[in-house]
Structure formats: C-alpha cells, structure tokens
Amino acid sequence: MTVSFQIFFTLFVQMMKSKADEEDYWNSSKFKAFTFDDEDDEFSTLKESKRTVNSIRCLVEEDDDKEEVEKVSWNGEPVSSKTLLWLLKQMFSIVVSLEKFRSLQDKLLLLDSCVAAHDGNVITAVLIYLKRTLSKEVLFRELEPRQTALSHLIHYLTETRDQRLLLELYTCLTCFCFQLLQYKEHLSIADENKRRDFLKSCLSLPFSPEDSSHVQDHYTLMERQVIIETTDRRAERGEKVERALILNMPLITTLSYCCLYHYSESEGTFSSPLNIRQTFKISEKQFFVTALGARAKLKAWSDVDALFTSRNWLGFTRKKSPLGFQRVVDILQKNSAPTQVLQDYVALVDDAELRITLAQKHKCHDIVINTYRDLKDRQQLLGYRGKVERGSGEERKIDELLNNLQIRWKN
C-alpha cells in the first residue's frame, strides 16, 4: 500500500466510523418499521440499493475509470493512482473531507506527510484545502520553507490562471527575500554599537510574528552583551585574569559566561544568569546543564550541590535533577570532579547494573559493595573483593558482609 493511500484511507475510515456509530442502532435493531406489504418494502429496498450502485458508477464513468471500481475494496495490495484520485473525489464531494484537520499544526503535518509520499496530486489536493481554510499571510509564510509544496501551489495557480493570487504570492516571497537580505546586512558591520543600532532598525521590518520575535531576541541579546562586556572590561583593569569576549556569541555561550563570572548576582542585574534565563525563556533543563558545567569547571562543588537540592512541603531536602544522573556524572567527570563528589551522584542512578558500572569506572567502591549487598549477590561481592586493595577499608567491609549471618544471600 502506498504511503499516500495510507494517509487518506486512514482518514476515510476515521470519518466514516463516527457516522457508522450514529446509525448503529438502526442497522442492528431487531425491530422493523411496520409496512402493509413486505414484498413492496423489499422491492423498494432493492431499488434504492441499485440507485446507490448506479450513482457510484456515474462518478467513475466521468473519468473513464470503470475498471478501477473493484480495487476500492482494498485487500492490502498497492492501489493505483487512478483509484486514489477517485477516492479523493468522493472525499471532497461528500461528508468525508479534510475538515477533520482543523488546527494549523494538523494541517501542516498532513501537508508534510503528503510531500514525503511524493504524490503530486495528493499534495495539490491538500494545498487546495489549505488555500481555502488559511489566510494568505499564514499560507505563504508556511510554504516559504516548504519548497516542494510551494512549487506545487505555483503550478496549480498557473494552471488555474489565478493571476491575482499568484502575483500576491510572488510579491510576498520577494518581500521576504528583501527583508532577509536586509537583516543579514548586520553581519558585515564591524562596529558593535553600529551593528546593535542596525539590528534595532530591523525591528520595524514586516517580518512574520515568529521571525519578528527572533529579530527582537537577537537585538535584546546583543544589547545585553554590549552592557555586560563594557562593565566587565572596566572591572578587568584592576584584575590580572582576562575574561573571554561574549560579543556576537550565541545565547547559551552568554549564559555560560554569566554562570562563570556573575553566578551570585541578584536577578535584577543584566548579567545575572537568572535574569538571562527569564528574559530569553531558557528551559529548565538547558539552564541546569549550562550552570552545572560552568560551576563544575570552577570546582565550585557547593554550588553544584545546591543545583540539585530540592525541599518538599514537609521541609525535607533531596537531590533532584531535570536530566539523568548518568549524564550528571559524565559532566562532573569531564570537569575532573573528585571521587567523593562523583560518588554522591553515582549513588543516585536508579538502574542497579548501570550504577555498578559507573561506580567501578570511577572507583566508587562503597557504592559497588552496597549495591551487591542490597542485591544479596554473594558471588559478585566475593569476586569484587579481589579488585580492591588488600588491607584496605573496602576489603574489611566486604569481609564483614560475607561473614554476616543475618544476610540471606541469594547465591
């Protein structure tokens, strides 16, 4: 079965299912309406069925596709393009239609699926629906990055001689290209203040709402970078350490810089990491990873520990992380965290086998020993005894566990 037919066959079944549910009582009822003549009733039913068959045949005969009628009862074999087009004509002419796709997200997902199926006729059918149900501004904006669908729409408008809409489409695309070229002009401006002022002038360009938001964030970030760098340059005059430059750097680089040099500042300052996070709507996970890497790089282990500390409504504290503790251990290890720091987070890995693997890798012997004890795996504990240093505290701890008669070992 072709992908394009899968899309519309699934749609056909879903739309018809709801209609079938409504009529389920009448189709399955044991009672029949009273008639004076049963024979006449059967004859009228027969005539109605015949009329229905003839109406379907007429649909097919319009395109000389009589031979395709048998293929509508799909049995899993590939269906021809003619049959698909015939099915589409029924879908657009009766209750079964694309009206099921109401939200913009659903409509675009349908379009992308049709493009992936490489069926031009189906793509055009969906574009006709989008043309009818979306504003021109939204349709043109969404088609601009979808070049395949855009070329199909241009071809369709050319074939149907819709010169007015075709002209509007070309005007919109030309305007978009002009705006993009003008926006990219800031890359050639060397002076930071002039570049910032140029970006400010770009805010008035008629971008789409999404693109306007991007340009606004870009200008705000550069404005923030200029303020931070100017302030830090003044402070460096009395310092021996030279800080990295952040001008024209990405947002996450700027956040990392602020986590390195301005971590303890209040949220009201421009260089505060919390202020950066709030201004640019950085996700909790992205902020956490960036802050963790920066504080670990400075070996500020108390700050690292504070990132994980969470207090519940009863006042108890526990370590909580928006990313897996295995990833946390990797970040700490790359920043040369000592064993006593690593073992606190290795111990928080949920999966026992993974926890043992990480503990062995980072020589967190206590975690390995405690995990084998909790698993009551005497053989593994006995084998691990040969991997620790002789006469060490770990060896004595293993011997105490092996000689403990209160533990019910499983092997």
Image (cartoon, rainbow, N blue to C red):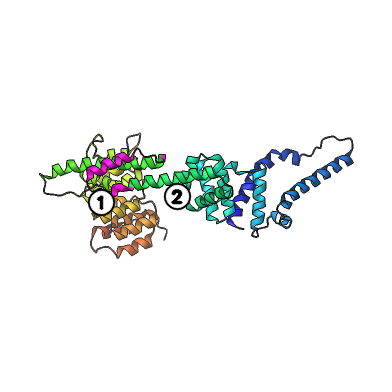
**Dot 1 or dot 2, earlier in sequence:** 2
- Specify the label residue 341 is tagged with: 1
Q: Residue furthest left?
A: 238
Image point (39%, 59%), residue name: 377
Residue 210, x across and y down, in percent: 40, 41
Which label lies toward us, 1 or 2? 2
CA distance for labels 1 and 2: 48 Å
Location of the C terminus (image quadrant): bottom left
206, 365: nearer the viewer: 206
Q: Is residue 206 magenta-colored?
A: yes
* Range covered by the magenta-colored residues: 184-208
Which residue is labeled 2 in the image? Answer: 145
The part of the image, by quadrant, that contains residue 338 is: bottom left
Mark 1 and mark 2 residues within 8 Å of each other at the beta carbon: no
Residue 263 visible, this orientation: no
73, 92: nearer the viewer: 92
Q: Looking at numbered disc 2 in the image, what kind of residue is underneath it?
A: Pro
Q: Looking at numbered disc 1 in the image, what kind of residue is underneath it?
A: Val
Residue 263, x across and y down, in percent: 23, 42
**Above-or-below relation of 368 to 226:** below
In-image side of 291 versus 62 (left or right) = left
